[in-house]
Image (cartoon, rainbow, N blue to C red):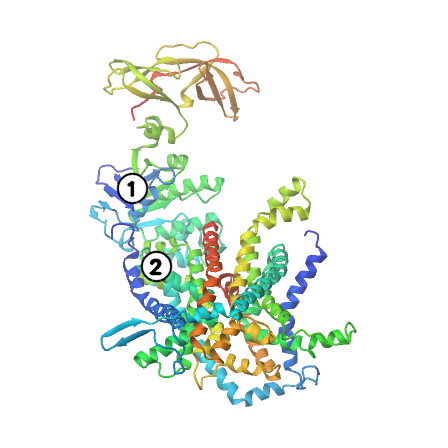
Amino acid sequence: MTDTTSTPLVQIREVTKRFGNVTAVDRVSLDFLRNELFAILGSSGCGKTTLLRLLAGFEQPTSGRILIDGVDATDVPPYDRPVNLMFQSYALFPHMTVAENVAYGLRKERVPAARIRERVAEMLAMVKLEPLAARKPDKLSGGEKQRVALARALVKRPKLLLLDEPLAALDKKLRQHTQFEIANLQYQLGTTFVVVTHDQGEAMTLASRIAVMADGRIAQVGTPGQVYEFPANRYVAGFVGNINLFEGRVTGVDGGRMSLRCEALGVELAVLSDEAIAPGSAACVAVRPEKITLSRQAPETKDRNLVKGTVWDLAYFGDQSLYRVRLKNGTELQVSAQNLRRSAKLTVEWDDEVYLSWEIASTILLLS
Amino acid sequence: MSDGTTNDGGHSLRWLRRMVTLPYLWLLLFFLAPFLIILKISFADPIVAQPPFTALLEWGEQGFTGLKTTFENYAFLFQDGYYGIIYLASLKMAGIGTLLCLMLGYPMAYFIVRQPPRRRQILLLAVILPFWISFLLRVYAWIGLLNNRGLINNFLISIGVIDHPLTMLYNDFAVYLGIVYSYLPFMIMPLYANLERLDLDLLDAAADLGARRWQAFVDVTVPLSVPGIIGGCLLVFIPAVGEFTIPALLGGADTLMIGRVLWDEFFINRDWPVASAVSVVLVLLLVAPILWFQRLQRREQEAAP
Amino acid sequence: MKRRSPMLMTIVAFGYALLYVPIVSVVIYSFNGSRLVTLWGGFSLRWYASLLADKDLLGAALLSLRIAIVSATFATALGAIVALALHRVNRLRGRLLLSGMITAPLVMPEIITGLSLLFLFISMADLIGWPASRGATTITIAHITFSMAYVVVVVRARLAAMDESLEEAAMDLGGRPVAVFFDITVPMLLPALVSGWLLSFTLSLDDLVISSFVSGPGATTLPMLIFAKVRLGVTPDINAITTIIIALVVIIVVAATIISGRRGPVAARPADAGGQ
């Protein structure tokens, strides 16, 4: 799906945007490839919306350049950019019908009327809205509005489509359905889609690549798998998914293997790492809840880290259970386990003494 | 172009910046300048001439030669107890009028808010509709009703409640009635806007915790509607203080309101410097409530979703 | 529905009666054949006929209409510009002064506005010889000045409620700023412009105090004429004028409300405006 051989469609080079003395976007460099569905993920106020507005041309960077298709577009106004935006509020023109909304962009391009009608019809068919063409936006449901906004932004066949929190206004059920629709549409049209979202689940399922943003900077860029399994730093590790995080100190380095003393766990942990770190330096160790195995008998310890604790709390979800295990020194770990066997009785109960173990390879070392 | 300004701004904002000069100059010339002139004249000596006041700034051969001011007009206002009494009387009339307006307006707003949406719309429209009909003519309409031989007296006599007509016109009663009648919508609208936002769950919560209906009203509804009450009261009080038409048409010879006195001072006594001084003092009296009102509005705007 | 308290119902009924009894009584008595208010002399249109014969009154009405139309148009245009500038231009030079000057007329007692404008016109006539005489022009200027303030309130309320991303969306779809202004901004503001105009029109048509100050010999507006007449008591032909005005207002307001949907121009008035 991703064509990495050609030059990137969009190149963001060292872009900074300041409002007064607030730096919303801080020296961001980022490439969007052709035909990819890219997600910018971050909490509110991280600068992702500003970055989107810079791409759409509503804001101008304080410094840095934005290249679209190899051409410097930094100073190109929004109406001359081959970029369209689907607004979070949808921003449908309330005084125009659905068809007129979709036609607006083509009218501004001075496309002949007959051609406009054709393309509007085509676009409405694609988002399955033909029967509603003559409706005004206030007579549409949330999902229908979203599709009109999508159709309106796509009808001009932009090189780049920006989607600002495209699913935020939809209810949960519709959201899942729409996710697939957007991914499908992107595949059909081959346009580059950039989705801005605060929802990590949304970013993971939709996108082929994700950029995690924090405090105006890019914290990590990678595939969903890379971002989840190999977080670049503490922020990404904590923001994407659940995680157990502990401070530690390097005690020994042996080839690709490293041992760390973790006071919170009261044990020595082993981690795989090629990083050149001097013994004695501080580092952080993390492990995802689903990587931990829970057992009442002492497990095999080869290539595994092991701690012992008591089940403090558990939540049963049917398909899986979430345990909170408290160690003797009070530290808590989250463990999630698939309920693989059909049984009304839990194998591990409240106050059970348990062993927690996980593979050394699943242990994440975070240096920043 | 780099900080804060956006691309869409480019042309349209430059255009707007240029266009706004026109209304700006207009307001400077026709609103601010006149007010400064009034201030100036209030410090001038009255003379028998046209215009009947001495120039404050004298332009001699060598240009500006001096500023001639006199505080006589203000001294006159304060020494002559007459004006003090009128200011107080105006504040009193406006204040009582406002309270009466609140006593009538609050229950109405409360009632309207609790109607189903469609009826609410109609009732609200019915409150506002009279406003589009000439204020002067609506005040006038009361003359026919309140007359000694007007509709109300005729009606009361015919059903035998009274046998002599009640004097209801050309006195303070008529002015209060006029104020309540004219400004009722100004009271109801902010109250309505405020009460509409009241979360009805709060009343249920109060009831759930043991409050009776009227207790919930006193403990929850009233405290939460204080901004609406203040807003409505100021909206009535501020214009009522300087009101001219109502006391002129419905008031008696002894109904002292500053608007009317000012009118007479100007059109009958032709004492422009004193009229100016009276105006300046009136504005000073209104500054506090106006600032209060503006602060309230700003806060309401910030609080609005 | 909840229980109704008889006390509350009585107050509400009294309130609405207070609002409508005077108006209704004037309408009824405008068809009274008798000159006396107290006597019902049978249905008659004689007061309407006498209106048509009253040259002074027709002249005053025409003058008032002319002033109202011109001043409402200017006030709407100028007020819309001020509202847009205050809402859109971030660092407007002299913003504080402008917003102060545009809100002050809402709360300034009309009698002071009238007096001060008169002094201005006199001073200007002294200094630059214009306006040589006061009349329709000076009244129109005065009306534009205070109506503008009301227009700004109405338009700003609309701007505040407007989704700014609409204009960005239009621009994103290829609309240049001027096109966006006419495609999106103007249609969005239209209800506010219409209600601002109507508001200015009625304020102008209704104004007695300010007109009385800034008018000169020969320029008598309808409210000035009515005031002179009603100071002497009830006159049946004024009842007839009132009825005509009421009929016009009801037709316009109801039509405007139906056309513009729930938040019609009517609803904009007292909530947004600051004073009489």
Residue at image position (41%, 27%) is: A242
Q: Identity of the amino acid at label 1?
A: Val
Q: Determine which residue is flagged by label 1.
A: A25
**Does the rendering let one see residue B12?**
yes
Residue at image position (56%, 86%) is: C51
Is A276 above or below relative to C24?
above
Mark 1 belongs to chain = A
Mark 1 and mark 2 in contact (Cβ < 8 Å)? no
Task: Write down the quadrant of residue C168 in the picture.
Answer: bottom left
**Does the rendering let one see residue C186?**
no
Q: Please state if B274 lies on the left or on the right of A163 as rendered.
A: right
How many numbered tags mark residues here?
2
**Secondary structure beneath label 1:** strand
**Secondary structure beneath label 2:** helix
- Residue C21: x %, y % from top left: 65, 71
Q: Residue furthest right?
A: B160
Q: Identity of the amino acid at label 2?
A: Arg
Mark 2 belongs to chain = C
- Residue A271: x %, y % from top left: 31, 17
Give the camera-side residue of B71 and B153: B71
Report crowding for label 2: few under 14, some 14 to 19, many 20 or more residues within 10 A (C-alpha): some
Q: CA distance from mark 2 to mark 1?
A: 30 Å
Q: Determine which residue is flagged by label 2.
A: C95
Task: Write down the quadrant of residue A50 in the picture.
Answer: top left
- In what quadrant of the picture does the N terminus of chain A appear? top left
Report crowding for label 1: few under 14, some 14 to 19, many 20 or more residues within 10 A (C-alpha): many
Q: Please state if B129 lies on the left or on the right of C65 as rendered.
A: right
Q: Please state if C50 lies on the left or on the right of B263 as rendered.
A: right
Q: Please state if B1 lies on the left or on the right of B272 as rendered.
A: left
- Residue C88: x %, y % from top left: 35, 57
Give the mark toward the camera: 2 or 1. Answer: 2
